[in-house]
Image (tube, rainbow, N blue to C red):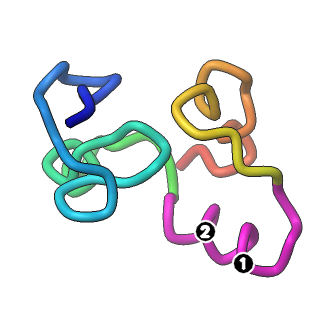
C-alpha cells in the first residue's frame, strides 16, 4: 500500500493509482496538473526516464504540465 503524494490517501500502484505516486482520484480531477497519459506514452517510447515516486519532485513531470 502506498500513499498518494497529493492527497495522502492509501492506494495500490497499478490498481487504484500509478507508479508515479498519484491515486486515481487525484489523477481524474480537472485541476490535476500533469498529462500522465502523455508521460506514459513517452515512457513507452523510451523518451523519458521512470523515477517512481520521486518523478514529480525531480521535475521530470514538468514538461507534461497542463
Relative image position of residue 20 (x, y in whole percent): 49, 43
C-beta proximity under 8 Å, tags 2 and 1: yes
Residue hosting label 1: 44
Relative image position of residue 2 (x, y in whole percent): 26, 32
Q: Nearest the camera: 32 or 11? A: 11
Q: Is residue 45 left or right of residue 2?
A: right
Q: Nearest the camera: 27 or 55? A: 55
Residue 3, magenta (yes or no): no
Outermost residue to the right? 47
**Residue 8 sits above or below residue 61 on the image:** above
Picture quarter containing residue 23? top left
SS at circle 1: helix
In the rendered picture of this protein, how many numbered marks are placed on residues?
2
Residue hosting label 2: 40
Residue range in magenta is 36-48
Q: Is residue 44 left or right of residue 10?
A: right
**Which SS does the magenta portion mostly show?**
helix
Amino acid at each position: 500500500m502506498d500513499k498518494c503524494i497529493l492527497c495522502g490517501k492509501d492506494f495500490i500502484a497499478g490498481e487504484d493509482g500509478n507508479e508515479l505516486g498519484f491515486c486515481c482520484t487525484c489523477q481524474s480531477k480537472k485541476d490535476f496538473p500533469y498529462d500522465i497519459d502523455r508521460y506514459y506514452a513517452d515512457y513507452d517510447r523510451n523518451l523519458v526516464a521512470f523515477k517512481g515516486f520521486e518523478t514529480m519532485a525531480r521535475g521530470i513531470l514538468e514538461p507534461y504540465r497542463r
